[in-house]
Image: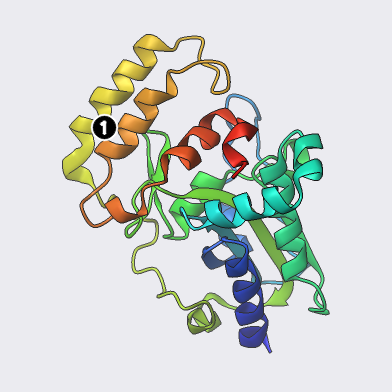
Amino acid sequence: MVEALLAKINSSLLTRGLDLVSPFIVQTYNAYCLEGTSHMPTLPPLATFNRPSTLALLIANTKELWPKFVAHANSHRKEVEASDNPLDDYVATAVHEAMKDSNTAYEARFTYDTDSKFVHFQRLGHHIGFAFLDQTMFLSVHDEVGPWLAYRAVLVLDIDCPAEDIAWSAIGKPKPTALPAVNPIPELHEKVKEHMDQFFAAAKEYSNRCHENHKFLISARDAATTDRARKFRYSENQIRYHYTKDKSLLWV
């Protein structure tokens, strides 16, 4: 039953371009990732549904999201033009649609959620072995796709599933071999730092929608990209939308 549900969810998300799905146990996040930040003294835990080993999914995307989202935007132009953040809307719809007819209670949290629903996605990805949290670049680096990914949601399921029973075959991904994640690009650290230093020097009052200083962040991402991961680099339009949210980039 659980394997079939995971396969169904994964298949539905793939059709929307949400092509990175990693199962994990909620209690792992609640145990290791709730240390406070400068904005919040203690981070809110994820729901457990009063289960001892609650199954959840970390949902992210590579460049595969962009053509799906652009197609959606052009077929729903009025809706997209009226939205403050149509990509957030698109992702939320995709996640809820993936749970349609599942007969399973769930809680979804998204990267834009705040306060009692806030999730530290980068910490989560790091501790479950999904992607290394690079403290120089403040981005996660995946062993295969490098820094060319974006976290989108966490989907907590009302299902008890010990970690050793997770059906990784249902999502077509191997089980992580290192917990927490290991830095896949230690040899690129100095190059990445050089570009981040330029960013901080140029952008003390940085706003990612008003300034062009994100060019240094893009350079840092490129510096953190291995030859193997280069094929996963976002298109120029996807990169620009990622940093500016300029809707004119959506129309084809």
Amino acid carrying mark 1 in the image: Val
Query: Where is residue 131 drawn, in percent x and y?
Result: 41, 54
Splitting the image into 4 quarters, where does residue 218 fall? top left
In percent of width and height, residue 180 lies at: 39, 56
Does any portion of residue 151 appear in the rendered image? yes
> Which quadrant would the C terminus be assigned to in this image?
top right
Q: Where's the N terminus, which quadrant?
A: bottom right
Which residue position holds label 1? 192
Which x, y percent locates residue 85? 71, 37
**Rendered location of residue 96, percent (x, y):** 77, 63
Is residue 109 in sight in this rendering? no
Residue 107 falls in which quadrant of the image? bottom right
Nearer to the camera, 168 or 74: 74
The answer to whether residue 175 is left or right of residue 246 is left
Colouring: rainbow
Secondary structure found at label 1: helix
